[in-house]
Amino acid sequence: MAPWLRRFVACAAFSAAFLAPQTSAWAGAPAQSLPTRFAECPQFFAGGHPPEVPAARGLRELCYEAFAVLHSGESRTPVFVAERLNRQRIEDADEKRADKFFADARLPRSERAELDDYKGSGYSRGHMAPAGDMPTPSAMAQSFSLANMVPQNSQNNSGPWAKIEKDTRRYALRAQGDVFVITGPVFEPGSERIGPRGVRVPAYLYKLVYDAHTGKAWAHWQRNQAGERVSAPISYAELVRRTGIEFLGGRSD
C-alpha cells in the first residue's frame, strides 16, 4: 500500500480517538501556555504526520488550540500553518473578531516579528489560519499571533485571498469528514523585508486542501500583489514541486 494511502486509512480512526479530548483540554488557554512540539498536537495533520520540510536553521514548532505553526526565525513568518476543518468546527466558528495582534512569547525575540514591524509598512498582517475558521473565542484570540501572519498586500488579502478562505470553509461544510488545510508563504531570492527586524514579504501564498474522506487534494497558489484574481487550483504534485515540501508523505498526484 502506498504511504499516502496508509495515511488516509489511518486518518479516520485517529480523528475519533484524539481530536475531541485534546481540543477540549486546550480551550481557553493563552497561547503562551500551549505546547511547542507537533508531537503534542498531531490532530492538525493528516494521519498525525506533519509535512516534511527541508532542514533549515531557526525552525520552531508551535501548537495552538485550533491550528499548528512551523515558524521560521529567518523570515520571522510561518513556513506553514496547519488546520483541521469539518462541518462542526465551521458551524461553531466565532463570528466576533478579536483584532488584538500579539507577538508569541514562546519565540525568542531574535526570531519573531513584533507589532512595530508592520506599522507603516503598507502591508496587512495576513492570517495564514484565518480568524473566520476559529471555533471558540480563545482560538480566535490565538489566531492573531504574529507567528500566524505574513506581510500581505491589503487588496489581495481582502479580495481574492478572502474568497479562497471562504470557499475553503464552504467546502468543509459540505465535506463528509475532516478537511486538512495547510497554508503558507513562498519567498523569492532578495525578497523585500519590512520593519526593524526585517520580516520577509512573500512573493506567493499557497493553501493546500486535503479531503480525508475522498482522498482528493488540491492547492490554491496566489501572487502576493494587488490586481490578482482567484486562479485555477493546481495539483498536489505541482505544489510540492514549487515549494519543496512533502505535505502528505509519498502522495504523488
Image: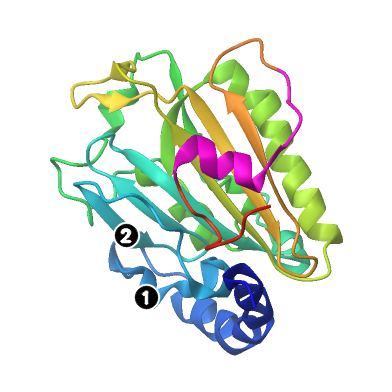
Q: Position of residue 20 (x, y in %)?
A: 59, 82
| Residue position for label 1 | 39
Q: Is residue 238 magenta?
A: yes
Query: Observer-nearest residue: 240 or 171?
Result: 240
Outermost residue, top side: 227
Q: Position of residue 79 (x, y in %)?
A: 39, 44
- Residue 139 lies left or right of residue 238; in this view the side is left
Q: Position of residue 164 (x, y in %)?
A: 71, 36
Q: Position of residue 246 (x, y in %)?
A: 49, 54
Look at 39% across and 40% down and name the residue there: 101
Quadrant of image for the N terminus = bottom right
Residue 165 falls in image quadrant: top right
Look at 23% across and 41% down and name the residue there: 112
| Residue position for label 2 | 61
Residues in magenta, as a range:
229-244
* Up/down of 1 relative to 67, above or below: below
Neighbor class of circle 2 (other Cα within 10 Å; few <14, some 14-19, many 20+) is some
